Amino acid sequence: MLETKRSAFSAWYRLNLLMLLILASAMVSPADGQTVAQKTVPLKVIDVKDPGGQILSYRHLAESTLVHMRGTRLAPKAQITVKIGSRPGFVELDINRGGISGLAPAYRLGKDFLTYVLWAVSVDGKASNLGEITFEDQRPIPVNLTTPYQTFWLMVTAEPNYAVVDPSAQVVLYSVKQVPKSENAALPIKGDLFYFTHYAAYETTPGGAIAGIPNQLLQARKAVELASKSGVLAAGDSKKNANVKEEVYTHEALKQARTFLARSEAAYQKDPKDQAVAQFARTSAQSAENARALAMGAVGGLVMRQLEGELTSVRRELATLKRAEAAAGNTPPTPAAKIERVEPAPPAPEPLPADAPTLVKQPALWFAIAGWAVALVLLFRRRSI
């Protein structure tokens, strides 16, 4: 019987805990709120407090203007000049070969970092992956990118692969105020530079260069490694829930990523210079990143579905325990009940004699006392005069 009571209390406790988790998840959309990365991790906000940062709004269909990006303490020598112009339906960003300088390899910021990604961040902190900043023989390659945003600030972060859906906390460059201003200059917008991310936990111990292996293949390996450690994809949580379609899709995405990684590895072993190495590697990184984003709640609603499923399971367990208690003829314990100390009631005041001239019983005394008080005040005032 004691064991049954303990089981009932355990089920009740788990039920309440799950209800709290679902309530917390419901307060934020699944794509922007809770996440699972080695179990549940909340969405984090990253502030960029370096001086001179600026949010800019670009004039519709205006000619191009130059925007400068300054390095943070992680890359104090880094600089980027971006040519930005508004086009019908989008804003175009152009970085020429000479527009990037002082940007060291990403692995110096941590073993998990293999490349850099340029982001456009909206005024409400939503970061959009614009594309990878690539290098050829330690020289940055020119890039031409677009974004549907009209008002945003720019930043560059170190990342494990080019396809990440959320930025890391390793910000190396950010956009600053335009000086000098021109007729086509963007409109400065007041506000702090911040963004939200599900991917704040990375290995920041500096790594080293791996000679001879294409960077695309290294990115694919790292993407599959990180995805395999995330949420339902982790080694200790290999059970599939066929009732949750998003969980099935998540496992399938990781399986696809491993398949393309194997193709890339095979092509590399056959001919390291084969274009198929980079082709299959980038496809593998993309699929692995999709799987990780689903598993961590960065996209989709997998985390919410998992909590709802576990809540249903615990409710069933609790109902079974209650039926067992009822069949045994006992009332299940009430864990939430608290033992309160009952203080003795204070003694009631003794009743006043019936003839006692209290103010309550004789309200006329109020007027008499008030009249005497006014008379005394007037008397002393007259004497003083």
Image: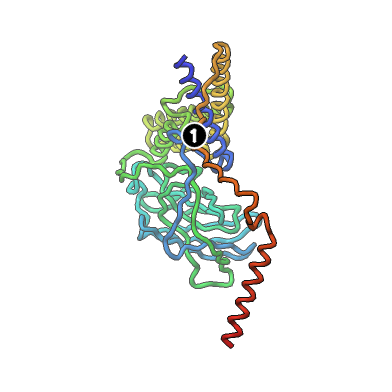
**Can residue 123 be seen from the camera position used here?**
yes
The 10 Å Cα crowd at callout 1, few under 14, some 14 to 19, many 20 or more, is few
Task: Look at label 1 and name its amino acid.
Answer: Glu
Please tell me in which quadrant of the rendered image residue 80 appears: bottom left
Left or right for 300, reference 216:
right
Residue situated furthest right in the rendering:
364
Residue drawn at (59%, 54%) of the image: 149
Q: Is residue 7 above or below residue 253?
A: above
Q: Residue at x 41, y 46 (%)?
A: 115
Mark 1: which secondary structure?
loop
From the viewer's perspective, is residue 91 above or below residue 21? Answer: below
How many marks overall?
A: 1
Q: How was this image coloured? A: rainbow
Q: Nearer the viewer, residue 199 or 58?
A: 199
Residue topped by disc 1: 340
Q: How far across and how far down the image is residue 56, in percent?
A: 55, 62
Q: Quadrant of the C terminus?
A: bottom right
Q: Residue at x 53, y 20 (%)?
A: 332
| Residue at figure coordinates x 54%, y 57% from the top left | 93
Rendering coords of residue 127 (x, y %): 52, 50
Q: Quadrant of residue 33?
A: top right
At which x and y percent is residue 235?
41, 26
Q: Position of residue 35 (x, y in %)?
A: 50, 38
**Going by the picture, which residue comes out furthest to the front?**
355
Q: Examine the image and state in which quarter residue 47 appears.
A: bottom left
In-front residue for pair 79/369: 369
Q: Is residue 279 visible?
A: no
Q: Is residue 49 above or below residue 27?
A: below
Observer-nearest of 140 and 357:
357
Q: Please name whichever residue, 13 or 367, is drawn nearer the observer in this view of the structure.
A: 367
